[in-house]
Amino acid sequence: MPPVETRVVNKDDGELRLDRWFRRHYPALNHGRLEKLLRTGQVRVDGKRAKAGQRVSPGQSIRVPPLPDNPQSAPTRPRQAPRAEDAEALRAMILHEDNDLIILNKPAGLAVQGGTGSARNLDAMLGALVGRKAQKPRLVHRLDKDTSGVLVLAKTAGVAAELGKVFRGREAQKLYWGLAVGLPQPRKGEINAPLAKGGTAGQERVSVVDQNDRTGQKAVTRYAVVDQAGDRASWLAMMPLTGRTHQLRVHCALLGTPILGDGKYGGAEAFLPGADVARQLHLHARRLILAHPAGGVLDVTAPLSPHMDRAWRAFNFDTADEDPFDLDDREGRWG
């Protein structure tokens, strides 16, 4: 049995969650065993009790108790090896690349990480971008499997940590486009409705809760109708001011105008029988504006996915229409 260790968090580990730090440095230690060590105070950060989800910073010390050479761990699925065609597929998604990061236009239907029903996922594919000396790109944020659009990857752990702070601090400006069934009233507004998660892993379901419900998390969305097809369908521009799971989908359903194809939250009302549109979720991460870690401002726009482009043409929507939130006016945001 090895002795107690004190490990100092290095700069490459950035602002990792504690459980992910252990996963990186002690891969044989399963999550259940780690939770027990945390509950009993055997794992400490800077001498204090810690939780799995707290973030550790460079320079902090972590007490690591004696661990068996081969601790019993829960069975895990074998890591998927990158396929030869993964690199080509990923390169076709790239909207922007520099020394620090890569920005992709994620296609609808591709899961970001593995999970229930996800035979292939982006995280597994990223190994195809690793050169002989390069690090595997790191996911900075997430998109739902069926949501397309702008997705940011960091080339190093340090850049991932910096960008993680930007996203957690809500400093990134995110614009989504969605096709809603019906016409919301009012046509422009802000939804402030806390959300709470339920269900099990891979089967999560989010619901609106009362403002005083302690299980809820603050969730705020600005929205505006850009164009409409009578009162049958609406092109919505949406800015999430918080980043909760399924936030835009639940908030649109709350308005009585679910996102087209979102049967999970809109039921049968989320579909348009007879319309020349796909029975897929019509939600797209259209644009992202954020401070670049190396300086300046990065502004990236993702073309619509094929099924949403088809819907836009079916309803004669013009993608050149102006942004209703005037994101190009950066005074007061970046100054």
Image: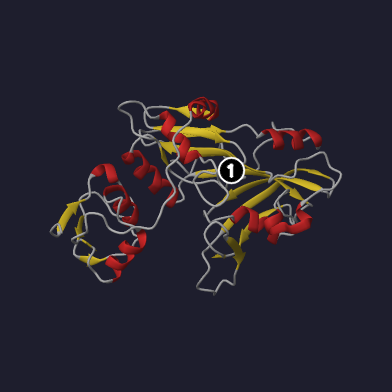
Q: Is residue 196 above or below residue 75?
A: below
Q: Position of residue 53 (x, y in %)?
A: 37, 60
Q: Residue at x 30, y 47 (%)?
A: 24
Q: Position of residue 265 (x, y in %)?
A: 68, 58
Relative to the observer, which residue lies in front, 326 or 2? 2
Relative to the observer, which residue lies in front, 62 or 131? 131
Point out the residue furthest to the left here: 3
Residue 176 relative to residue 295: left or right: right
Quadrant occupied by the C terminus: top left
Q: Residue at x 76, y 46 (%)?
A: 234
Image coloring type: secondary structure
> Is residue 165 in view?
yes
Point out the residue furthest to the right here: 274
Tag 1: amino acid: Leu
Quadrant occupied by the N terminus: bottom left
How many discs mark residues in the rendered view? 1
Residue 267 relative to residue 58: left or right: right
> Is residue 330 in view?
no
Q: Residue at x 69, y 33 (%)?
A: 306
Q: Position of residue 18 (x, y in %)?
A: 31, 56
Relative to the observer, which residue lies in front, 237 or 130? 130
Relative to the observer, which residue lies in front, 75 or 22? 75
Residue 46 relative to residue 75: left or right: left
Q: Identify the residue position indicated by label 1 in the image.
A: 175
Element type at mark 1: strand
Q: Position of residue 10 (x, y in %)?
A: 22, 45
Disc 1: CA contacts within 10 A as few (<14), some (14-19) or many (>=20): many
